[in-house]
Image (spheres, rainbow, N blue to C red):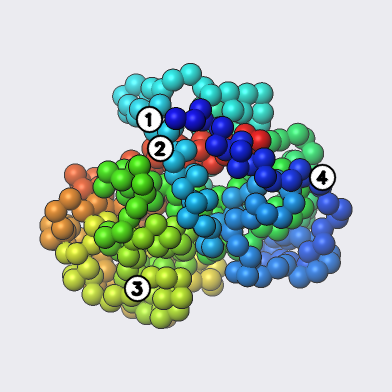
């Protein structure tokens, strides 16, 4: 087997050298509901839906911006590398990390986490992954940054890049921020979740967890598997990345939920639609439960609705009705297909989209997803930073 990085180096060597940071932003002056400025003056923000989430043909560093449009071969690069790392690093919750010595991929290098939106799993796992690779991580927390003094997100990114970081990991409330930043810096940019658009490392870890459970880490051929994504799909960057990656690898993806959360347009992403949770629960090989994104509803951005019973919204009539029709209740979970698994990207609304005993039960791979998230982020940083 090729030493880790050899395949990566040969692939990455096709990427031309970075041309250096571009001048002041060529992009438009874009604000948002929170008053956060993304870019400086210039052209409007590109329509990210027209751009592939990956782009290793354009001159400049290799970024990971999304899974939509990513060729199967590219997807497999990340997944096979994750499998190699999984073979080297075994989980042990009681003793912590149990693996071989750091690969040194990031020795002496620092990755910057630019998180303009809250996170537990993604930010922490990127930090741990950087350290496992022999490097370090620096965190910019939006609430304590100069963004609050009016600095644009791109100026913020360029400022942190100027400190000499190896890569920028970007999380934002708005779609397209990681892409915009990638056009304005010379280092690799990793999208750690942008608005409702994409969350590619979450998509990769979801795929990896399914492939691991169904014992197909050699081929990642998911043909024959039916994966149900249940809930607030329209607000979910996790769903968009998962649908893209899973369908590329041959899985059938079925989105389940009310029309306000799973509109007909979801079909254009490559997924099927089913409104009957009781039917899908018996035939799905994995049930990926999504969180109702109350915070997006509160900022006017979601079809989802009430935090408390009786608070009617356009998205869902009530949490009680939502639970009755779509939640993974204990009674529903008892009718799941033999061997089928329960997934959730987190954070969970326990007792809303999934019952606590189901989330903690034998079918749940939720914490395995978290563990695999560290491996996936190690793989992504290895791939992007090995050249
Ligand atoms: N799944 C996920 O993105 O979780 P965090 O928001 O905690 O990073």
Q: Which residue is mark 4?
A: 20
Picture layout, residue 110 above or below residue 171? above
> Residue 359's spot in the image, x, y percent?
26, 49
Chain-order first, disc 4 or disc 1? 4
Q: Residues within 10 Å of mark 2 (few under 14, many from 20)?
A: many
Tell me how far mark 1 sits from mark 2, CA to CA.
6 Å
> Residue 128's spot in the image, x, y percent?
51, 32
Tell me how far mark 3 sits from mark 2, CA to CA.
29 Å
Chain-order first, disc 2 or disc 4? 4
Checking the image for residue 87, the label placed there is: 1
**Is the CB–ligand 1 distance for label 2 below 8 Å?**
no
User: Is residue 60 visible in the rendered structure shown here?
Assistant: yes
- Apparent side of residue 117 relative to residue 317 in the rendered image (left or right): right
Q: At 51% across and 22% down in the image, what residue appears?
A: 102
Cβ atoms under marks 1 and 2 closer than 8 Å? yes
Cβ atoms under marks 3 and 4 closer than 8 Å? no
Chain-order first, disc 3 or disc 4? 4
Tell me how far mark 4 sits from mark 1, CA to CA.
37 Å
Q: Foreground: 320 or 114? A: 114
Cβ atoms under marks 4 and 1 closer than 8 Å? no
User: Is residue 318 visible in the rendered structure shown here?
Assistant: no
Q: Secondary structure at mark 4?
A: loop
Q: Secondary structure at mark 3?
A: strand
Chain-order first, disc 3 or disc 2? 2
- Apparent side of residue 210 relative to residue 146 in the rendered image (left or right): left
Q: Which residue is mark 3?
A: 272
Tell me how far mark 3 sits from mark 4, CA to CA.
43 Å
């Amino acid at each position: 087997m090729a030493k880790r990085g050899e395949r990566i180096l040969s692939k990455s060597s096709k990427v031309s050298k970075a041309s250096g940071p571009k001048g002041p932003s060529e992009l438009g002056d874009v604000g948002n509901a929170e008053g956060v400025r993304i870019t400086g003056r210039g052209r409007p923000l590109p329509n990210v839906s027209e751009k592939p989430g990956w782009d290793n043909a354009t001159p400049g560093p290799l970024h990971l911006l999304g899974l939509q449009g990513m060729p199967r071969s590219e997807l497999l690069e990340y997944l096979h590398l994750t499998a190699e790392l999984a073979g080297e690093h075994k989980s042990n919750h009681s003793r912590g990390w149990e693996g071989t010595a750091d690969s040194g991929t990031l020795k002496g290098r620092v990755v910057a986490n630019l998180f303009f939106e809250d996170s537990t799993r993604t930010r922490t796992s990127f930090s741990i992954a950087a350290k496992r690779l022999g490097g370090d991580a620096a965190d910019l927390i939006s609430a304590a940054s100069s963004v609050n003094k009016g600095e644009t997100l791109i100026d913020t990114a360029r400022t942190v890049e100027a400190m000499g970081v190896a890569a920028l990991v970007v999380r934002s409330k708005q779609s397209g921020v990681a892409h915009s930043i990638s056009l304005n810096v010379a280092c690799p940019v990793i999208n750690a979740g942008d608005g409702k658009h994409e969350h590619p490392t979450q998509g990769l870890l979801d795929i990896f967890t399914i492939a691991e459970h169904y014992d197909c880490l050699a081929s990642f051929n998911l043909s024959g598997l039916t994966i149900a994504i249940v809930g607030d799909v329209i607000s979910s960057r996790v769903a968009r990345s998962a649908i893209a990656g899973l369908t590329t690898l041959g899985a059938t993806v079925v989105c389940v939920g009310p029309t306000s959360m799973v509109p007909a347009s979801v079909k254009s992403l490559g997924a099927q639609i089913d409104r009957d949770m009781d039917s899908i629960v018996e035939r799905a090989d994995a049930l990926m439960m999504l969180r109702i994104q109350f915070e997006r509803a509160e900022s006017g951005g979601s079809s989802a609705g009430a935090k408390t019973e009786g608070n009617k919204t356009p998205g869902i009539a009530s949490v009680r009705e939502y639970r009755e029709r779509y939640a993974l209740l204990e009674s529903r979970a008892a009718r799941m297909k033999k061997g089928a698994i329960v997934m959730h990207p987190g954070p969970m609304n326990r007792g809303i989209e999934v019952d606590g005993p189901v989330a903690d039960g034998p079918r749940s791979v939720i914490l395995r997803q978290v563990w695999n998230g560290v491996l996936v982020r190690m793989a992504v940083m290895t791939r992007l930073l090995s050249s």
